[in-house]
Every structure is written in C-alpha cells, then in structure tokens.
C-alpha cells in the first residue's frame, strides 16, 4: 500500500488547479502556543471553544481552528485573523470571496486539513476505538454492499475495514457539503484493508462515481483517515504542520 510522505512545507506555497494539499496537524500544544493561536480566532470560534466542558477539548479545538487559519493564510498571503468564513445551510464552512476550497477534520490528538482550488473536497479522520459495536453501527449506516464486504472479512480485519468505510463515507459526505441529507445508502465505497479506496457506485446518478477520487490517509498509528475530492489525475502533497515552527 502506498505510504503518505509527510514533509515540512516551504515558506511560500502555490496551488495549481490539479494540486490537492493535505495538512496533518498535531493538536497537543503547549499552553503558550494555545494562547498565541487563540488570539487569531474570531469571536464566534472563541465562543465555541469556551463551550467545551474539558479544557483539553477546548485547547484541541483552538489548535485545530487556529492552525486552519494559519494554513489558509499562507495560500492567501494574509494574516490568520483576517480570514472570513461563511457556512452553508448544512454547516460546511467556506472562505468568503475565494476559490480556495478546504475541509477540516479532527479526532483525538490530530487534525487534518485538505486544500484545493475550485473542487469539492472533504476529509475525515477517526481515532480507532477498539470497543465499538461495529456490526450494529455498520448495519445502521453502511449500504448493503458495504455491510456484506465488511462481514466477508476475517474477524481480525473487520475493525480496520469498518473505519476505512466510515472515514471514506464521511469524507465524501463532507465533500458534497449536504450533511446527512445525502443518504448514506446512496453510494458505496470499498473498505477491504490493503485494497485501493474506490467510490464504487453512486445513486441515482451512476456517472457521479467516476468524477471523484477517494484516497486513504496515513494519519498515525491507531487512526484512520480518508479524503474525497472532485476530479481525477490529481497531484497530492502531504504537509506536516507544526505550530511551534510555522506560526
Ligand atoms: C457535521 C459532520 C461534518 C461531523 O463530522 P465529524 O466526523 O463528527 O467531525 P470532523 O472532525 O470530521 O469534522 C468537523 C469539521 O467539519 C466541518 N464541517 C461542519 N459541518 C460540515 C458539513 N456539513 N460538511 C462538511 N464539513 C463540515 C467543520 O470545519 C467542522 O469543524 P468544527 O466542528 O470544529 O467546527 C457531519 O458529517 C456529521 O455529523 N456526520 C454524522 C456522522 C455520521 O453519521 N457518519 C456516518 C458515516 S458512515
């Protein structure tokens, strides 16, 4: 299986139309870094951060959204604090007045940001929890073909297969930006560990599936991740974001 080559980004970044940049963000930051990055958030983001019950969750939210601002600011050559976001009626955030498309996902100690130009894009990462009732959750959320592929795996591969399916479905839903108004049974993804990530079928429009690239992401041990992006023959770049170095 292809491994993602996470590297440190150059100071100046240009995006071309066939590029897809994926940023891996470590969220476990010092309190000094959290204070620094918190000052770049909007009032709305600061209010959302304040709603978390546990300080560690609050800090991870600040680290994720502050890093998102710093990363997008690099492409737009502006300060993180100057960015303005809108959200569509399903909650998907977008940049105002820009053709830069992005999506954010966070789980546990990591966040992932995917960035491209003029294409729908979605990313999902999940910390793998071994104690989940996979079969029950799969039967409620996966399509018939996905459930049968999952149940056909040897039991020791079902955990990874489950999270492959979950993150691929979620990445596609997030890319479309329609929330769960796009029914989970209206498309099928591949899930077998070690096999390519494929959007196998879309309903009611069968042509839609050929217009998309689905890609697994190597986040870290015990994490699953996936990216869904409109288009094919794309160039992926993998950047490691380290706030202490890059802000
Ligand atoms: C809202 C949703 C994006 C939550 O996803 P999640 O896996 O809990 O969270 P993630 O960390 O991946 O993504 C959250 C980020 O996505 C972005 N986002 C929010 N709504 C979004 C939407 N409708 N579409 C795309 N991105 C969205 C935001 O940046 C958000 O960050 P924030 O919560 O810090 O503001 C949504 O897809 C959802 O609720 N899904 C239901 C879960 C489900 O049933 N999945 C089935 C998979 S088989």
Image (cartoon, grey):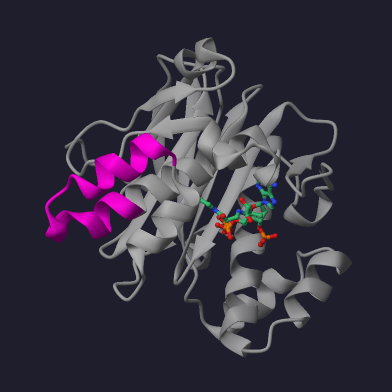
Q: In the figure, 135 relative to 132: above or below?
A: above
Residue 176 location, x and y as percent?
Answer: 64, 33
Q: Quadrant of residue 73?
A: top right
Q: Is residue 174 left or right of residue 220?
A: right
Q: Which residue is painted at 55% across and 31% down in the image?
A: 186
Residue 237 location, x and y as percent?
Answer: 40, 34
Q: Main secondary structure of the magenta part?
A: helix
Q: In the figure, 55 relative to 124: above or below?
A: below
Query: Along the line of sight, which residue is nearer the eye, 172 or 108?
Result: 172
Q: Which residue is painted at 63% across and 39% down in the image?
A: 102
Residue 137 location, x and y as percent?
Answer: 43, 60
Q: Is residue 131 left or right of residue 243?
A: left
Query: Along the line of sight, which residue is nearer the eye, 32 or 157?
Result: 157
Q: In the figure, 2 relative to 87: above or below?
A: above
In the picture as drawn, the residue positioned furthest to the right comes out as 43
Q: Which residue is painted at 26% across and 60% down in the image?
A: 159
Q: Is residue 125 left or right of residue 145?
A: right
On the question of residue 216 being in view, the answer is no
Write the start and end of the magenta stretch as one range. Answer: 143-162
């Amino acid at each position: 299986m292809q491994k993602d080559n996470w590297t440190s980004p150059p100071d100046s970044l240009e995006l071309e139309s066939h590029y897809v940049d994926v940023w891996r963000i470590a969220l476990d930051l010092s309190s000094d870094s959290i204070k620094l990055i918190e000052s770049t958030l909007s009032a709305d983001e600061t209010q959302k951060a304040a709603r978390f019950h546990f300080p560690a969750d609050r800090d991870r939210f600040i680290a994720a959204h502050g890093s998102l601002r710093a990363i997008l600011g690099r492409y737009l050559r502006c300060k993180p604090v100057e960015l303005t976001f809108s959200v569509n009626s399903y909650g998907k955030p977008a940049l105002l007045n820009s053709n830069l498309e992005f999506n954010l996902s966070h789980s546990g100690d990591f966040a992932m940001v995917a960035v491209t130009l003029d294409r729908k894009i979605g990313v999902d990462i999940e910390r793998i929890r071994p104690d989940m009732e996979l079969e029950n959750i799969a039967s409620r959320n996966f399509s018939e073909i996905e459930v049968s592929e999952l149940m056909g795996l040897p039991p020791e591969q079902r955990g990874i297969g489950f999270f492959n399916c979950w993150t691929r479905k979620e990445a596609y839903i997030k890319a479309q930006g329609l929330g769960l108004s796009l029914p989970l049974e209206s498309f099928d993804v591949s899930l077998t560990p070690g096999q390519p990530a494929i959007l196998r079928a879309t309903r009611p429009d069968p042509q839609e599936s050929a217009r998309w690239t689905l890609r697994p992401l190597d986040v870290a041990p015990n994490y699953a991740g996936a990216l869904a992006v409109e288009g094919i023959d794309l160039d992926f770049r993998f950047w490691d974001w380290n706030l202490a170095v890059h802000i």
